[in-house]
Image (cartoon, coloured by chain):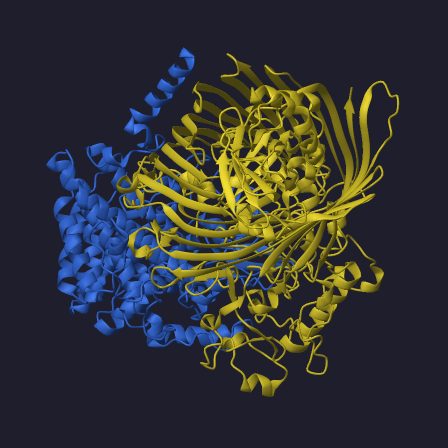
């Protein structure tokens, strides 16, 4: 009987004397109450703010390249699932607010913004040195500005989140005007420039983190977009003092040996390997759908579920001048045959220069910039370039030209061309601003091809409707599968629609013109 | 002196014969009594008597009424401690009616003709138990069935024992009103779901709480061998279940395992062996090789004709007449599969000790090749009575071990193997003429399909689950009526998983392997005080107060690798690349106080109040504790005198209850912010990153069910017929849901208390003995009408399943029932150019001969805004009908379950088997599709024009089918062998049994019980390529040994 009382007593003791019996927190996670204190923790929070860049880059080439005359796609006639049609719709200007791929851009950018806001709201409560704090805040503000800059260019007015969301009610914001988004971008970028140091080159390489240079480049592009050319020029001029330079050969820029080189102002980082999940696999998206990619990638896998996107168009192939080394560095041809299931069998990897298909074969051009040797199928080491020094030089040329300083503009422009052609024989000498404007635009197109600049350049220069309407007429003649309704490019198509799912939740969220309201 | 005399009387009657005889012979004794006794007594008038129970124990507090039949005058008294009552000097001579009532005993009436009050009369009454007085298992104890004021149904396992099934849930289908049990998958040993009174939540599951011998089961219940079970008790309303507080909102099922009864030691053996066969009806009738080649020819012709296609027809499809049936992939992947089961029960009990040992073995092969499950189970229950029966101690321990082989690979759902089986090319054989299995089994123009036959044959995917349920208890009677009860229970589980998938079924040719383990452990400790007392004869109370604590912990890890040098060694030690590894832990705890007070007056007026206070680790810091009270009352009308006029009514009780229960199935740590790792790369090195990825909700509170219930229990014609009716009404508020919030916040949802659901229903059960002669026929029928409606949700007032139009199957919207299907409304095909011109179009994808959807919003165009509600999966009523026949040595039982009025959405047919792009095999019926205005086909299937077919794969009303069914769940015919003079056997019975004997339904698939997420309120009635449910033919044997 005593035993029973002991049991009862023990049971009561267990349950009644320990209130923390029901105060549990997950021990396999970082407890939020102890987080956001030390420098190391804020560095981790910062690292996490970079990570949505990858979600962005996994979708950005659809909206920034495939929507333009640079690339299209391999039509997959037998599979008309939404995973295929939605991406095609972007290319054909038939996308709607339910399009997962434009929506993913919206979500990825806001994911990064949220992480930046959490960090910025909490860093004053941390125990870290001013120097560390400046560096962290600088990088974070650069990232927030970068994400907002993507958003404002793609979607126009968007909700403006500048603080951490801590409860559901705070999540329901209406859109803020594009001007107010730009104001934040400029504030953040300026603050980032002020707080961050110059890029650090260790054995010629940077770490991959944003630097004063990255923020300078970002703000320059913002100014260019806003046609504030003097401001842009002044900023761009500072870049040359930070240690940036062109690499000797254009093709070197995209070699995985030269990641984060002196030409790199900012790029999205990847790391190959079977562990850790940090790899990229862009080339597998860009090759035609195949059950065996060995001929091109050197390792065997089946990319039929993910491939077939971002195929260079004849238009961009034709855009390269003779002798331009950038053509061969940017585009190659996968030769082989399509079977009736729209699956490609590779037979050869060919150069684009002077390519004619072998008998009975077809050549499908593909983006070569993201093809580097790798060990494991579907697992590459390629980074995604965001800002390069060549880009800065061309922006500088543009800024000068737009201020009527055509002769000055030729200097940075011809630096880029001299590298591309190997000598100065192809240098531009035209100084008429109007002619030079088109030359610089063309130069940007071929220099920065497949690096997600084309769409933004077309829109900011006001050329998008003209160029893409002309391209659409040609495309519809060439591709019988294109709907008559495709390439109906109205001004409202210069902005992507606000995701329908967001509007379903938030009745205060308006839609861009031209989309189902 | 009096007492002595009664003893004499008793002496004549001893030993007690069967209780019926007591009643029938009583009048005789009453006549004899005076003769036997009066001489020795001094003359004193009056009526005296003794009341005892069947064990011969004197009953105190029995209310005895004596009524003069002629005058109606009535007198009452109660028995004393010795069970004796007296009425002094009754007035006049005549007919008197005596009634004896006592809590827990049948009311007994004795009519005494010509009672002469001047003479002393002596009555001896034995109050008896009958079935309505048996104790039933209730929350934290037992209660006499008659006094139960909540809605409780007890089902004896012995009544459902002969089914050739391996899960107890299958036995209970259709047996209990208001308890829907669905078999949504035929996966061996799995696929059963419960739903009590339509219980549903928007995100938590609606599985009831299972409590086995006081052990709240955490996780799966499928390791419990049905043959270990003695009774199931289903607690349906709030008063019955509120002592389980925060876990009771979905109802509670109390399972009691077998404990030996006093008597001879028993050895019982039972077995069955059966064959499982997928019914022919409902199998997808897809095109055979010739039909598919013909389709491809016609598809090609139409492309040439309408699209100017200039390519050639693939050689494989030329001359279709050369093909016969080709490969029937469904047949190739399925089989007749054996099922077998063996159980041995050894039990022994005497006054001091009782022990039961049960051992079982189940082996169920799957009807899909190379799948199956086996279960080894053992249970040992031991009870002791010590210290003059004041102390009861005991324990139960039940280890089990299950092996699942290829039983849990991704078979069901979109893009998984069941889909791949039916859409593979009939032109390709699973094994070619060289005996090799091709990697791909599609024909030209089809999407890739990795040989599903090879996948099932070559994959090794084994789960081994060990489970130990154990409990130890001690009950001590401190004082008369006061008991201390303690119970410590443990639910321990461990599972290992080994998977190897060879390179021969991988598109990149690389073998992959993974290994994982899960270890979980839950303990519950309870201490209770139970006090029963009768005051002033008529007032009976039972009070319960206690404490309970439970904690659950789980640890898991997994590792996966690739680059195996060969397929010979299938363990990760031979993998040259380990690709991922992780280990995790989770836990929850629950701290509770419970109290209950039952009161009854004369066993006629019943009152009960109960409360549980739960503190749970799962809820927000501001809402950690919740109170779950309930009250209930009952009135046993048949005990009232005015009911004497209705002698056919043996028992009539009205009861009502109201109470709160909660739902805590929301996962662990849901209310907290979560910091998760989001790594990145700097300096070509992986750098750890982490940020808040889940929004916290400190106010996350209990989902509360406020439920009231009105019930009626009636027995008629000497208890030959019984009837039960319940009406219930529940409001479930503070519904927990991952409330979607704009993703621009950085978060996609926050777990919140968002809405209100209302449920109500009517439940009827009638059972009785239809025939009682040589042919005995017992029958039971139940029917329940359950309704629900969503009362409130946060803006925008609905929750979509997802943001597609292809698999956004249902929408939960205010004013609608849960899970109503949502999509386009099919409006035929565009007949001709005029029809096309005059009808709203789906952008440029509409053409003559393509699918036309209804312009629901009237804006002259078809787009996502034209989707609407297209069907309600909630049945109008569910019913069950059980019949047991016995004739001589034969017995026959037939169980029927059914559902009426619910709809089924069938994407497995429409989203995948009517793909008109020639990319997958098709339903044979698609032959009859639109080819030209002159050849429009059946009007169901559109043309193959490129770029126009996608809309047919959007959810639409064509996919909605009537899901009503009547399923003859089981037919068992048994024969008990006459065993005269057999030395070893006491009893031997053989039987034949058919499970899923017959399903009457208009539904075109195999299984109308189909559901996407079990019976969760969201996702019911959706068929997405489920594992087929087989019919089972079995023979069995029950034997008991001397």
Q: Position of residue B94 (x, y in %)?
A: 62, 44
Residue at point 44%, 21% (across, down): B480
Q: A353 or B838, which lies in front?
A: B838
Q: Is residue B873 above or below residue B399?
A: below
Q: Is residue B178 above or below residue B159?
A: below
Q: Quadrant of the C terminus of chain B?
A: top right
B439 sits left or right of B1033 in the view? left
Q: Is residue B814 above or below residue B270?
A: below
Q: B142 or B89, which lies in front?
A: B89
Can residue A422 be seen here? The reply is no
Q: A500 or B799, which lies in front?
A: B799
Q: Position of residue B60 (x, y in %)?
A: 50, 28
Q: Position of residue A514 (x, y in %)?
A: 36, 75
Q: Position of residue B1007 (x, y in %)?
A: 67, 53
Residue at point 71%, 36% (across, down): B24
Residue B112, by quadrant, is top right
Q: Is residue B851 above or below residue A216?
A: below
Q: Which chain is yellow?
A: B
Q: B437 or A454, which lies in front?
A: B437
The picture's colour for chain A is blue
Q: Quadrant of the N terminus of chain B?
A: top right
B524 sits left or right of A137 in the view? right
Can residue B993 be seen here? The reply is yes
Labels in figure, total: 0
């Amino acid at each position: 009987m005593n035993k029973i009382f002991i049991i009862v007593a023990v049971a009561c003791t267990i349950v009644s004397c320990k209130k923390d019996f029901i105060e549990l927190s997950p021990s396999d996670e970082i407890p939020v109450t102890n987080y956001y204190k030390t420098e190391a923790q804020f560095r981790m929070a910062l690292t996490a703010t970079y990570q949505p860049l990858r979600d962005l880059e996994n979708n950005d080439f659809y909206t920034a390249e495939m929507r333009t005359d640079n690339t299209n796609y391999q039509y997959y006639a037998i599979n008309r699932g939404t995973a295929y049609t939605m991406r095609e719709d972007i290319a054909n200007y038939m996308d709607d607010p339910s399009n997962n791929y434009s929506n993913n851009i919206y979500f990825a950018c806001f994911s990064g913004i949220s992480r930046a806001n959490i960090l910025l709201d909490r860093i004053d409560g941390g125990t870290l040195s001013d120097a560390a704090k400046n560096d962290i805040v600088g990088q974070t503000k650069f990232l927030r500005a970068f994400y907002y800059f993507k958003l404002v260019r793609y979607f126009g007015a968007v909700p403006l989140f500048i603080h951490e969301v801590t409860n559901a009610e705070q999540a329901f914001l209406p859109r803020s005007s594009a001007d107010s988004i730009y104001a934040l971008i400029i504030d953040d970028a300026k603050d980032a420039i002020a707080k961050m140091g110059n890029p650090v080159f260790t054995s010629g390489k940077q770490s991959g983190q944003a630097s004063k240079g990255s923020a300078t480049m970002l703000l320059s592009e913002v100014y260019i977009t806003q046609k504030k050319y003097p401001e842009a020029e002044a900023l761009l001029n500072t870049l040359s003092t930070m240690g940036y330079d062109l690499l000797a050969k254009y093709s070197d820029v995209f070699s995985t040996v030269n990641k984060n080189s002196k030409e790199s102002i900012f790029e999205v980082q990847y790391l190959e390997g079977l562990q850790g999940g940090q790899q990229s696999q862009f080339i597998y998206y860009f090759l035609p759908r195949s059950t065996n990619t060995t001929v091109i990638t050197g390792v065997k896998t089946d990319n039929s579920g993910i491939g077939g996107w971002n195929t260079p168009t004849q238009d961009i192939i034709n855009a390269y001048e003779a002798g331009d080394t950038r053509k061969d560095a940017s585009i190659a041809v996968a030769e082989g045959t399509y079977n009736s299931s729209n699956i490609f069998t590779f037979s050869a990897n060919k150069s684009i220069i002077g390519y004619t298909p072998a008998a009975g074969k077809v050549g499908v051009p593909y983006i070569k910039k993201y093809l580097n040797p790798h060990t494991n199928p579907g697992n590459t080491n390629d980074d995604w370039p965001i800002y390069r020094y060549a880009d800065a030089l061309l922006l500088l040329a543009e800024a000068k030209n737009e201020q009527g300083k055509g002769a000055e503009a030729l200097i940075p422009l011809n630096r880029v061309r001299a590298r591309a052609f190997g000598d100065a024989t192809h240098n531009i000498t035209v100084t008429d601003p109007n002619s030079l404007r088109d030359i610089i635009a063309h130069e940007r197109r071929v220099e920065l091809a497949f690096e997600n600049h084309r769409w933004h350049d077309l829109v900011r220069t006001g050329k998008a409707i003209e160029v893409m309407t002309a391209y659409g007429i040609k495309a519809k003649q060439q591709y019988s599968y294109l709907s008559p309704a495709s390439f109906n490019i109205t001004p409202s198509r210069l902005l992507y629609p606000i995701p329908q799912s967001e509007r379903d939740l938030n009745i205060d969220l308006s839609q861009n013109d031209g989309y189902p309201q | 002196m009096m007492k002595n005399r009664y003893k004499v009387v008793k002496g004549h009657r001893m030993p007690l014969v069967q209780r019926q005889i007591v009643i029938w012979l009583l009048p005789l004794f009453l006549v004899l009594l005076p003769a036997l006794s009066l001489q020795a007594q001094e003359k004193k008038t009056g009526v005296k008597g003794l009341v005892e129970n069947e064990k011969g124990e004197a009953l105190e507090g029995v209310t005895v009424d004596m009524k003069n039949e002629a005058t109606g005058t009535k007198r009452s008294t109660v028995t004393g401690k010795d069970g004796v009552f007296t009425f002094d000097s009754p007035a006049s001579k005549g007919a008197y009616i005596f009634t004896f009532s006592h809590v827990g005993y049948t009311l007994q009436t004795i009519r005494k003709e010509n009672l002469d009050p001047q003479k002393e009369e002596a009555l001896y009454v034995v109050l008896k138990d009958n079935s309505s007085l048996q104790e039933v298992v209730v929350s934290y104890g037992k209660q006499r069935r008659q006094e139960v004021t909540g809605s409780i149904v007890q089902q004896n396992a012995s009544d459902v024992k002969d089914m050739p099934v391996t899960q107890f849930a299958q036995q209970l289908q259709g047996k209990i009103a208001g308890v829907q049990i669905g078999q949504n998958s035929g996966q061996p040993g799995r696929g059963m779901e419960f739903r009590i009174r339509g219980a549903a939540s928007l995100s938590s599951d609606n599985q009831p709480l299972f409590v086995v011998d006081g052990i709240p089961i955490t996780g799966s219940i499928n390791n419990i061998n049905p043959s270990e079970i003695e009774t199931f008790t289903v607690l349906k309303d709030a008063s019955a279940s509120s002592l389980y507080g925060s876990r009771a909102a979905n109802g509670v099922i109390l399972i009691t395992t077998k404990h030996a009864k006093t008597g001879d030691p028993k050895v019982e053996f039972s077995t069955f062996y059966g064959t499982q066969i997928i019914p022919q009806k409902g199998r997808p009738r897809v095109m055979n090789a010739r039909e598919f080649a013909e389709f491809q020819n016609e598809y090609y012709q139409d492309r040439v004709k309408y699209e100017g296609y200039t390519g050639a027809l693939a050689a494989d499809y030329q001359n279709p007449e050369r093909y016969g049936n080709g490969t029937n992939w469904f047949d190739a992947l399925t089989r007749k599969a054996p099922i077998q089961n063996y159980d041995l029960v050894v039990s022994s009990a005497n006054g001091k000790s009782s022990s039961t040992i049960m051992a079982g073995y189940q082996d169920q092969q799957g009807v899909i090749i190379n799948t199956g499950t086996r279960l080894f189970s053992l249970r040992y229950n031991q009870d002791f009575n010590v210290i003059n029966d004041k102390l009861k101690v005991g324990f139960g321990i039940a280890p089990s071990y299950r092996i699942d082989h290829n039983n849990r690979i991704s078979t069901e759902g979109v893009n998984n193997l069941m889909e791949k089986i039916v859409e593979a090319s009939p032109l390709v054989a699973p094994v070619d003429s060289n005996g090799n299995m091709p990697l791909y089994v599609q024909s030209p123009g089809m999407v890739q399909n990795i040989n599903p036959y090879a996948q099932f044959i070559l994959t090794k995917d084994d789960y081994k689950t060990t489970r130990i349920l154990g409990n130890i208890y001690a009950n001590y009677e401190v004082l008369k009526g006061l008991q201390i009860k303690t119970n410590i229970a443990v639910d321990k589980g461990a599972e290992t998983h080994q998977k190897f998938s060879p390179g021969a079924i991988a598109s990149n040719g690389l073998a992959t392997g993974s290994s994982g383990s899960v270890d979980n452990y839950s303990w519950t400790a309870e201490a209770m005080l139970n006090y029963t007392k009768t005051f002033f004869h008529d007032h009976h109370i039972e009070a319960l107060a206690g404490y309970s604590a439970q904690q659950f912990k789980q640890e898991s890890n997994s590792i996966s690798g690739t680059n195996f040098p060969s397929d010979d060694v299938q363990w990760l030690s031979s993998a040259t690349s380990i690709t991922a590894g992780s280990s995790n832990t989770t836990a929850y705890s629950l701290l509770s106080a419970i109290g209950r007070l039952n009161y009854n007056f004369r066993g006629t007026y019943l009152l009960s109040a109960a409360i549980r206070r739960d503190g749970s680790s799962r809820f927000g810091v501001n809402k950690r504790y919740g109170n779950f009270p309930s009250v209930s009352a009952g009135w046993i009308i048949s005990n009232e005198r005015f009911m004497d006029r209705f002698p056919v009514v043996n028992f009539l009780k009205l009861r009502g209850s109201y109470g709160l229960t909660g739902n805590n199935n929301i996962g662990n740590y849901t209310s907290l912010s979560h910091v998760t790792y989001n790594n990145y790369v700097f300096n070509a090195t992986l750098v750890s990153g982490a940020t808040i990825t889940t929004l916290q909700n400190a106010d996350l509170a209990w989902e509360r069910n406020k439920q009231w219930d009105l019930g009626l229990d009636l027995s008629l014609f000497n208890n030959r017929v019984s009837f039960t009716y319940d009406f219930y009404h529940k409001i479930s508020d503070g519904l927990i849901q991952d409330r979607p919030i704009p993703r621009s916040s950085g978060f996609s949802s926050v777990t919140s208390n968002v809405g209100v659901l209302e449920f109500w229903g009517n439940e009827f059960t009638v059972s009785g003995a239809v025939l009682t002669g040589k042919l005995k026929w017992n029958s039971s029928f139940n029917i329940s009408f359950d309704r629900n409606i969503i009362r409130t949700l946060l803006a925008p007032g609905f929750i979509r399943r997802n943001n597609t139009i292809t698999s956004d199957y249902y929408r939960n919207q205010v004013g609608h029932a849960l899970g109503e299907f949502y999509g386009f409304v099919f409006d035929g095909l565009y007949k001709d150019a005029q029809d096309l011109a005059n009808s709203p179009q789906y952008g440029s994808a509409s053409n003559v001969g393509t699918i036309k959807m209804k312009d629901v919003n009237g804006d002259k165009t078809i787009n996502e805004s034209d989707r609407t509600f297209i069907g309600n999966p909630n049945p109008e009523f569910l019913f069950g009908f059980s019949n047991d026949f016995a004739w001589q040595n034969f017995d026959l039982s037939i169980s029927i379950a059914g559902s009426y009025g619910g709809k089924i959405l069938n994407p497995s047919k429409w989203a995948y088997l009517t793909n008109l792009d020639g990319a997958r095999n098709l339903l044979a019926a698609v032959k009859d599709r639109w080819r030209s205005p002159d050849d429009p086909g059946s009007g169901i299937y559109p043309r193959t024009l490129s770029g126009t077919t996608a809309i047919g794969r959007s959810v639409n009303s064509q996919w909605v089918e009537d899901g009503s069914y009547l399923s003859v769940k089981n037919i068992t015919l048994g024969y008990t062998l006459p065993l005269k003079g057999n030395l070893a056997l006491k009893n031997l019975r053989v039987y034949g049994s058919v499970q899923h004997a017959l399903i009457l339904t208009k539904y075109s698939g195999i299984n109308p019980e189909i559901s996407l997420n079990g019976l969760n309120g969201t996702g019911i009635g959706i068929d997405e390529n489920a594992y087929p449910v087989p019919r089972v033919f079995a023979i069995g044997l029950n034997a008991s040994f001397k």
